[in-house]
């Protein structure tokens, strides 16, 4: 597959199917049972690879995992959402002794 490549030691994200739909627990909602459970993990590539190829990585905790290369140099996109006025004021009120 053409596209971005990673070098050995580069920060990457891989993915794989952890459980097929047939192997999902029957204790989860029916609509969830119908889709596979996908896993995604970030770590340092152990070899060069192109997007879509299999590659192994070492996580920051030392685990070695193998999956499809999804992202080269992934970044974090989460946030804590919109600040809530009530929560912003709590610290000020506590410091004022109110």
Image (cartoon, grey):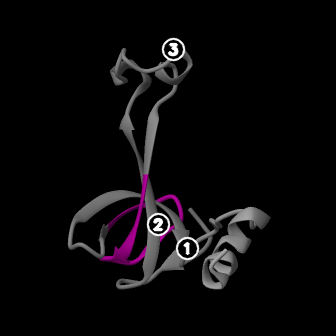
From the image, tell me which residue sits under label 2: 13
Q: Which mark is residue 1?
A: none
From the image, tell me which residue sits under label 3: 30
**Height in image: 35 above or below 71?**
above
Q: Residue at x 51, y 58 (%)?
A: 52
From the image, tell me which residue sits under label 1: 74
* Residue 14, quarter of the rendered image: bottom left
Q: Please tell me which residue lies in front, 74 or 49.
A: 74
Foreground mark, 3 or 2, reads 3
Q: Residue at x 51, y 19 (%)?
A: 34
Residue extent of the magenta highlight: 40-56
**Height in image: 32 above or below 61?**
above
- Distance CA(mark 3)–CA(mark 2): 29 Å
State left or right for residue 97 relative to residue 30.
Answer: right
Q: Is residue 49 magenta?
A: yes
CB under 8 Å between discs 2 and 1 = yes
CB under 8 Å between discs 3 and 2 = no
Q: Looking at the image, tell me whether mark 1 or mark 3 is earlier in sequence order.
A: 3
Q: Residue at x 43, y 21 (%)?
A: 28
Residue 21 in percent (x, y) is at 43, 23
**Height in image: 95 above or below 61?**
below
State left or right for residue 83 relative to residue 75.
Answer: right
Q: Looking at the image, tell me whether mark 3 or mark 2 is earlier in sequence order.
A: 2
Residue 18 in percent (x, y) is at 35, 40
Q: Using a 10 Å C-alpha cutoff, classify the residue at mark 2 as few (fewer than 14 neighbours), some (14 to 19) or many (20 or more).
A: many
Mark 3: which secondary structure?
helix
């Amino acid at each position: 597959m053409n596209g971005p490549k990673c070098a050995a030691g580069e920060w990457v994200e891989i993915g794989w199917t952890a459980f097929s739909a047939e192997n999902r627990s029957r204790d989860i909602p029916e609509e969830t049972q119908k889709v596979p459970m996908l896993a995604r993990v970030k770590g340092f590539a152990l070899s060069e690879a192109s997007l879509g190829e299999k590659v192994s990585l070492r996580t920051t905790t030392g685990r070695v995992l193998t999956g499809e290369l999804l992202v080269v140099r992934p970044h974090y996109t989460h946030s804590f959402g919109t600040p809530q006025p009530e929560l912003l004021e709590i610290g000020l009120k506590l410091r004022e002794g109110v």
